[in-house]
Amino acid sequence: MPRLPQRTPPWARLRNWAGEVRDAAATGRRGTRWSRASLVAVPALGVASALGVAMAQGVVAANFFVSGQPFTLRSDQVNGSGFAAFLHSRQLADGSAAGKGEAMARAGFQSARLDGLCAVIHQTILGLPYTLELNAGSPVDGKADGGPDVIDAYNLILEANAVQGAQSQFSEMVLGKTAHQVQMGGQPLEGGTVGAFGLEAGVVRVTGLRADAFTAEISGNITLPKLALGIVPGTVEC
Amino acid sequence: MVTVTARAVDAAKSCAAALRWFTAFRRTRPFWGGLWMVLGGWAVMSLTFAPIAVVLTAGFAGISGYLLGGGLILFGLCAWFAPRGRHLVGFLGVLFAVASLVGSNLGGFLVGMLLGVLGGAMTFGWGPKRPRESTVDSEGAA
């Protein structure tokens, strides 16, 4: 294939561009003009806070999909219907290429009604630890008080390696179904291994739930009345 | 010995030249706005890394992290390498950042949304400025 003779090689073009950047820097003074920036930023923050208020009132639903980040969830009571769960191994990033396999329970609710919700995620930015704290509904204080501020979530899937509940009730249970066929109220719960142990339950009630989870998917909606979100420096627990 | 010191001097010189070029690069484009957009997009996207099968079954909630976070990163890079389109890119970045509040984990738990709004607005507002009066006298056309 004959090359076009006038075509400049990529390194020459890069060198040209670098020279153009250098020349352009010598002319005039540029920078952020904050008066113009605020023309966009102020209405955007206004819209964002209006959306936040609408979410706290339960008018606008939020979308959640957290994966591969350890976080803690607490709720005074969870009333779920269309429950399905199985155990599987999940690859967690630990620096190696393959990751580290860890046994986890993957549990799905077709619909769940939560009496208060508190979630914390621990993260580090530039080496400094900080905690994201999310509170919604009635305060998580160990009392299942019901009330108008319940949180409704649809198609909620959690993956956890430690789940504790003070009290739990299951009814309409099917035990020992093969894991790749379990369904949460008619919808399949994806990701099961063929032949592994799975369970289904029509109605679930767990009081005093505490879960160390790695994945939260809410493919339906979640309403978050009394939403409060905070960033706290350091490592804080729920 | 002489060649070693000569080499060290050469290395220091080229380092200084690279630094000077980077300063020129920084001053001719909305660098900081683009950087905040890239970091904000990363904050939104990094929460949602999952196997693609899981992402697809999760529907919009799974996709939106990649869509909104990835979009913010792209707009940040556009602000760096195509600074002429900064008005459009900055505006879209702010729009995506606000959309991520509803669309993806409350905008990367607020961090990503705030960085995206800041970066997008800075990119939108970036442009030629009047030269500083004091520096004009001392340095000429700086």
Image (cartoon, helix red, strand yellow):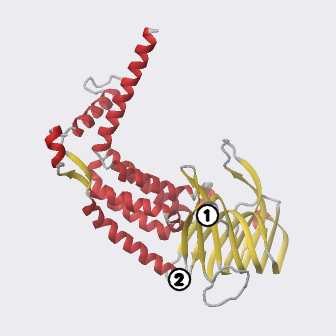
Disc assigned to residue A24: none
User: Which residue is label 1 attached to?
Assistant: B57
Residue A149: image x %, image y %? 60, 86
Task: Quadrant for residue B7, please give it.
Answer: top left
Q: Quadrant of the C terminus of chain A?
A: bottom right
Question: Which secondary structure, mark 2?
Answer: loop
Q: Are marks 2 and 1 in one subunit?
A: no
From the viewer's side, name the closer residue of A133 and B2: B2
Left or right: residue B54 versus residue A77 is left
Given the image, what chain letter belongs to the residue carrying mark 2?
A: A
Q: Is residue A102 above or below residue A184?
A: above
Few, some or many residues within 10 Å of mark 2 (<14, 14–19, 20+):
many
The residue depicted at 68 percent of the width and 47 percent of the height is A94
User: Which residue is label 2 attached to?
Assistant: A58
Q: Quadrant of the N terminus of chain A?
A: top left
Question: Which secondary structure, mark 1?
Answer: helix
Residue B56: image x %, image y %? 58, 61
Residue B8: image x %, image y %? 43, 19
Residue type indicated by callout 1 = Thr
Residue type indicated by callout 2 = Gly
